[in-house]
Structures are given as structure tokens and as C-alpha cells.
Image (spheres, grey):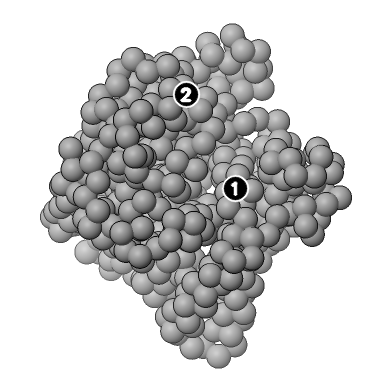
Amino acid sequence: MNSAIVALIGLAVFYLAYRYYSVFIGEKIFGLDEELVTPAHEFSDGTDFVPTPKHVLFGHHYASIAGAAPILGPAIAVIWGWVPAVLWVVLGSVFIGAVHDLGSLVVSVHHKGQSIGKISETLISPRVRTLFLGIIFLLILMVIPVFARAIAKLFVNYPGSVIPINFEIFVAVAIGVYVKRTGEKLLIPSLLALGALYLMILVGWKVPVHISQFMPWLVALFGPLGSAAAEEQAWIVLLMVYGFIAATLPVWVLLQPRDFINSHQLILALGLIYIGIFTAQRVIVAPMINLEPIARGTWYPLLFVTIACGAISGFHSLVSSGTTSKQLSQLRDSRMIGFGGMLGEGTLALAATLAVSAGFASRSDWLTHYHSWEVAAGSSILAFIQGSATFLQPLGFPASLAMVFMSVVVISFAATSLDTAFRLQCYIFGEVGQSINFKPLASRRVLQAGITMVIGLAITLMNKEQVLWPLFGSTNQMVGALALLVISIWVMNKGRNYWFTLAPMLFVSAMTTWALTSEIGYYRANGNYLLLVIAVIILLFEAWILYEAWHIFRKRTPGLAAESAR
């Protein structure tokens, strides 16, 4: 099969979905035609609640959700064949993921910018809020290690990315301060910064940097100098420190300018990849369906949790209700940001699927990489870099430069998701501190970020990505299912048709429960009792939440929480 044909069909479906389905969902299900003073205006504080132009906010939102996950997931799941992966990416993004993202944003805006976990207290019960926050807390515990290890692996394997990535951080801070002081628009400075970043990619390509060159003492803590494993662990330490610092800064200092730069970068990179796909027209060498690979289990249900962020992601509901809803200037902007942002992520996941399906020279090369789950999961990010680089080479990119370029793109977005996860975990600690009336935890961002850093570092150093990924995907999808549950109750209370959100919720919940059950058996057999306990807790919390929500649907009380729905 020609990869260009698959790409064309997928993009056409995404276009039609945004053109027609998003309008229907936005107007008929979520009421985007309503006039509403958004939390960004009502509670404007210059730190978290900041009215933001929709294109700038789209950049932040898109960069925050489009991290390494929509690349990692498809790059692993293609072990079961490219057809199941493509179908779940395209159809899942349209009918489940985009509806989930838009709904999370709209419901949060109607509830004064509260998180989806906090909203569950109003719509279901205080107990559910506590349980939901517990699952979200565990999800972010998985998010931080997964993204941190992916970035560290890329720094080690593509040292040419070190200089441009660090340059981007410093120039984003400079732009943030400049825009704040002058009141200038962010567009022109961000475009200039993007151009400068590409020059720095050329510098990094010529001057690769290893962490052992400037921090040999840190590398020595984890092994001998020159050891890839020791360098990876050392980078993880630095990334945790970075996440701590980023989470304590106001959003305008680093988050908004860097995300806007990254939104340009992703759009351009995706454009180049798809131009390369249509130019090279490489043949897909991966099997259409591979139902009996040497993997962790059968493709059902594991496919639906392995491709997490590329089809639906509970993490997106945390971004939508955690940071994006506090910056939304007008309710009608949410269709572009929520629904459109998820289709953008689906576009990235589709490109990742094609990169690891058609980016290998032959079927035997593909089988060498995908002969086992451990190899596929442990080096999936590298397979994407190499595969996508083959799409750029017909456009004139030298192979080594193409790989540095793509590694910078991936790291940029993984770093955005990393510090967004830090910030979201701080919000959760704040809500926990309020619940137990412990003021330091409720209000001190430094303490919240510090605890997040320590716990994240410990889990990351203790586990490899091939062990963490199935639990991350399952927890992520569980949060997505529960967010859809909260959204469905809100839609029901508005007197609208809630089956457009409840039916996806039931499907995702069933697949996730099935997958978590199988993972519990795997962790028990391999003696990984930490992850075993986490998986059992998540299942118990989910069962309790579903039980309480069932009574809400049985009673069908449209007036429930109506006084706080605006």
C-alpha cells in the first residue's frame, strides 16, 4: 500500500470532521452559541487566568497535548499491523478524542475554570471528586516519567538537539518578558524565534553536546562516563529540575511564548513530513494486520490503550480544564482549540504511524525492530525519528540533519507536556491541600512542585518505558473515560442528547478496564508490586465512580447542579 494514499484518506476524514461534525457537536451538544463571561476575564490575575487570543491559546493547547505520546503510542502499536493502528487513530480522534477535548474545555469554562476532578464533586458527589483526583494524581505520576525518559533518550541518541532545545527555552523566556512589558503581539517575535531556532539546529548538527562534557560528576553517579544508560539517567535528573522551575513561573514567562513557538514548529514539521510522504510515496512495509506478534498480549484491548494520546487522552482533559480554560477569551473559540487541537494531534499520530510503517527499507528491517514488545516499546521514539527522516530526505535534508531536526521537534513537545504535567500536579496538590485544610500545600507552588519533582524522579529512575507505557496508557484512557462521564452528566443536565459523549465513554471504559486487568496479571507475574498496587487502586476507584454515576443517570435529574453550571 502506498503511504501517500493512506495519508490522503486520513487527512480528508479529519477535514470533513472539523467542517461538519465539530459544528454539530459544538452547537447542538455543548451550546457554543451561548454568551458567557469566561473565567479568563472574570478572574483575570496575570498568572493563571489570562485572556488570550485564540491563535496564541491554540498554540499553547496544541503544544501541551501534542507531546511525545501521540508518537510513542502508534510507534509501539504498529506491532499489531498498520491497519488497526490507522483506524483507531482516525476514527478514535474524530468520534471520541475530539469530543472529549472540546467537552472538557466547555464544561470547565462553565464551572469557573475548575479542573475536571473538581467539577465531578458538583455533578456527582464529593467522594467522586476525591477518587477522581486520586486517579488523576496517579496518571500524572505516569506522564512525568514517560516524557522525561523519552526526552533523555533523544538527548543521548541525538546530541545535536541539546543546543537548539536549550536555546529555545531561553529565547522563549526573553520573548515572554518582552511581550509582557511592551504589550506587543506574540506572533512576530515567535516567528523570529522559530527562524533563529532553525539556525541553532544547524549549529547543534555540527556541534553535538553530551552531558558528560559539562556535567561528568552527574553522569558518574549512575555509571561510567560514556555509558548511554548513565547519561540518560543524568538527563532525567536535569529534566526534573527543569520541570520544577517551569511549574513555578507564571504562564506568560515560559509556557505561552514557548508553546506558541512550538505550535509554529509542529505545523511546519507536520507540513514537511506530509509533503515528504506525498513526494516519496514510500510503500508501507509493515503488515496490514499482525494478530500474533510476540507482544504483551492480544491487540484487543491493548491497542486501545497503547495508542492513547493519538485517539483519546485523559491528559487532554487535564490540560483543557487545568490551563486552557483559564485562558479562553470567548466560548466560541473552544471549537477551534478543543476539537481542532485534537484533530491536529490525530494528524501527528497518523504521521507517526506511517513513519514506522513505511520508513523502513524492507519488511525484514521492520521485522527486526518489531520482533518483540520489549524492543518495539524501548526504541519506538527512535524508530519514529529515523522513519520520519526518510520522508524529509527527498526534500533535500541530509539524513543526519533530518534526524536532528525531528528530534528537536519531538523534544520540544515532550518538554512542553512535561512542564504542563508538573503544573497540573501542582493544581492537584493545591486542591488536596484545600480539602485537608493544610495551607502550605494548598498555596505554596514551590512546595507543590518540589514534591512532584521528587516523586517523579524516583519513579522514572526505577522503571523503563516498556514497563510504564501500558499502565500510563490505561490510566490515561481511564481518566478520559471518566472525563466523558462527567461531561455526559453535564450535557444531560442541560437537557441535550448525552449519547454522543456517553457511548464513547462506555467503549473506552470497557477497553481500559480489560487492559488494566491483564496488566495486573503481568505485574504480579513479574514481581512489580508498585505498579500492581497502582493498577488495583485505579480499578477500585473507577468502579466506585461508575457506581455513583449510575445512580445519577438512573434518577435523570436535569436540575442537578444547575445553579453552578454557569
Quadrant for the N terminus in the image: top left
Q: Is residue 471 visible?
A: no
Q: Do the residues labelled 2 and 1 touch (CB within 8 Å)?
A: no
Q: Can residue 309 be seen in this view?
A: yes
Give the amino acid at mark 1: Asn
- Residue 442 x, y percent position in the rendering: 70, 51
- Residue at 34% x, 39% y is 361
Give the amino acid at mark 2: Trp
Q: Name the image quarter holding residue 307.
A: top left
Residue assigned mark 2 = 373
Q: How far apart are marks 2 and 1 (CA)?
A: 21 Å
Q: Which of 504 and 83 is in front in this view?
A: 83
- Residue at 32% x, 63% y is 395
User: In the image, is 351 to the left or to the right of 118?
Assistant: left
- Compared with 9, 401 (above or below) is below
User: In the image, is 455 to the left or to the right of 400?
Assistant: right
- On residue 157, the disc is 1
Quadrant for the C terminus in the image: bottom left
- Compared with 51, 436 (above or below) is above
